[in-house]
Amino acid sequence: MIMKNLSRRQYIKTTCAAGGCLLAAPLMQKFLTSNARAQSSGLEDKTEARYYQKLDNRKIKCQLCPRECVIDDLERGYCGVRENEGGVYYTLVYGKACSAHVDPVEKKPMFHFFPGSLAFSYATAGCNVMCKFCQNWEISQSRPEQIESLDLPPQKIVTLARHNHCVSIAYTYNEPVVFTEYLYDTAVAGRKPGVKSIMISNGYIQKQPMSDLCQVLDAVKIDLKAFSERFYTELVAGHLRPVLDTLVLLRKKNMWTEIVYLVIPGQNDDRRELKEMCKWIVTELGPDVPVHFSRFHPQYRLTNLPATPLETLKTARQIGLDNGLHYVYTGNIPGDPGENTYCPGCGAVLVRRIGFRILENKISDSKCPTCNYKIAGIWK
Amino acid sequence: MEKRRQFIKKTMLVGGALLLGRRSATAYAVPGLTIPSNTAGQKQSRVVIAHRNDLRTSQNLPDEAAVQKLLDTALENLFQQNSQNIWRYLFKPEDIVGLKVNCLAGKGLSTRPELVNAVVERLIAAGVNKSNIIIWDRHDNDLLRAGYTLYQGRQKVQCFGNNRVGFSQDIAEYGQIGSLLTRIVTEMCTALINLPILKDHGIVGLSAGMKNNFGVINNPNKYHDNIGDPFVADVNMLPPIRNKTRLIICDAITAQYEGGPPFMPQWCWNMDSLVVATDIVALDQVCWDIVETKRKAEKLFSLKQAGREPRYIATAADQTHRLGTNDLEKIECVRV
Ligand code: SF4
């Protein structure tokens, strides 16, 4: 995605080099120049939102995410993509994809879910938090009328996914919680022809909508941004507890879940905090949840910090392993041995990766071919 | 700082020191221009509330000529100068002047076109080219709903929303704020007049001068937490807003004391007034006082009791922001 210090062309070049040029021919990411922005307005296209409560004086209370925005007539919620009009709450992004790619599923990152497959990935405008390190801020922090979007209703997404030989559809780049209705209907449309659905989320969602989504999703990746409330308050503009609650809910629903933890120097790399988090995951979610410790690169409003030292990531991975997690990865360091999947039983390398590419996959019938250990995940 | 100093120097040369006197350390927006010391005494800022009993026509609509007179009275009392001098002093013929209206609530509770027309008249009389006047708000739709006619071009006064020209590419940051700013403010205009409406706001308590500048940023929805504190103050610290704003003219012809920001006629009253200042904090403090007085008269809870005391006003006046004064003791509030 576009980063503060990386032009779009540079980015495409980088990702093409890393993952093979997998950009779908019919679709390109649509970030706008300021002039082009001016011409688009999705305001006329509205679909009634699903999780809200009507209040007096044409106010509403949104019940989709923990913010529970109370919104006056003609105003929008924090996410900027839901609007109250005359006491009826609308989503402004239903069927409006502002970015669409065909990505390797490893790019999500999702390492234990159909490895080597393609995921048709799309986004809309908006987000329900405001991470100071967001790599997709140009879409996540925009309102729908500020960025160009394509009319891509759910059925069209499914058609494009199949046309591009995608095993799954990934709801990603911005926060899919804010386009829940669009996500849900797309996932339902994909079920019949057997296209899977993966939600790439911050987990900042209420219990009911998440439970409803669990009925149509096949896997979820949660960005656990830190294990401290301070970090969530200061750098995310949210809270930790609801994210942990979502993870526990996903566990209860038996949803395949992977966790990404972006390690930011001096902000969430404290060894004690990492240890506590890993212990919590093992206790509450079990040791088989893959955890990806990813490298931070300075961007958006955190350009004053350095990139994460490789040693820090290796240390974080070791803390995870030492505390009982079975599958711990380093991320954003192409070629690092921490990208591989190792058998928790015998330690054999099962899946060798470089960046988003699979070099070798020895898992057979969900098991290690050497010791027969059952490897957690959805492999086919 | 460099630019601001240059500007002070320039305006003093162009306008001559019409308004002599002590320059307030915290005066907002009009470098080199303050109330005269002989009339202000020890007060730091002046806010004028100008009212007319004959402001409306028999159809209960603002009368254009009466609004023009009200505007002149308000400004003449603010600057202690005749109207012609004031406009010539504040705006140079080469200025491109943005008039930021507040049209979210539609026709019933938006900056009145009659007031905007009066401002346009005076700008043109001061030598500003009519096509160099831009009436703007967040979106074309907001302006249309409030009764404005859209126009973008070189033949007449322009009127359009941010949506036509988009936002600058650089992230503007101050305190908690990280936003893109409308190109109308960053690239097109050399001077701004803030023309808010006086109304209650369901989240931040008060929508007047400072809150109106949420229309400058691309992500206003992100800054309503904690009843807008310190976000509203932080937005007003962004240099393009701070350095270009020359005047705040708050439309209190129809004001609303409860149920805002949407138009709720049951809570509106015909105040038939304008509130004007160059100190945006002082103006907001006075506007807050007006709303509280009205709420009390209507036997409503105070904004504090209602859980939405506009604390951002005090934040804007604190030592970090120094956008103006919120101390009513230091504000000379003139009623005419
Ligand atoms: S989804 Fe959007 S509107 Fe709803 S509570 Fe969350 S931020 Fe607010």
Image (cartoon, rainbow, N blue to C red):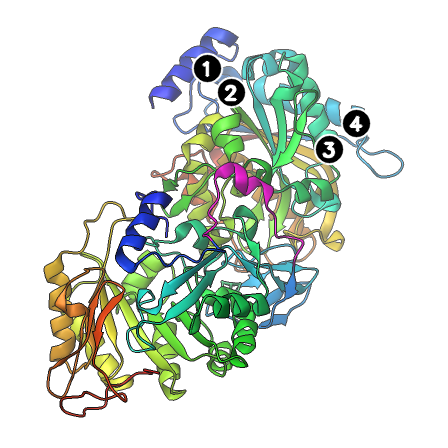
Give the quarter of the image for residue A251.
Answer: bottom left
Amino acid carrying label 4: it is Glu
Q: Does the magenta stretch include residue B163?
A: no
Percent x, y of residue B125: 68, 13
Q: Which residue is drawn at 72% across and 41% down?
A: B144
Give the extent of the magenta segment.
A28-45
Judging by the rendered image, the residue that carries numbered circle 3 is B113
- Is there CB contact under 8 Å for labels 3 and 2? no
- Spatial CA span between label 4 and label 1: 34 Å
Judging by the rendered image, the residue that carries numbered circle 4 is B64
User: In the image shown, does A93 or B79 lie closer to the viewer?
Assistant: A93
Amino acid carrying label 2: it is Ile
Judging by the rendered image, the residue that carries numbered circle 2 is B35
Residue extending furthest toward the right: B58
Q: Indicate left or right for B308 with A168 as reference.
A: right
Q: Residue at x 19, y 82 (%)?
A: A326
Q: How dense is the environment of label 3, judged by Cα within 10 Å: few (below 14), some, or many (20 and up)?
A: some
Task: Please say if B210 is above or below A45.
Answer: above
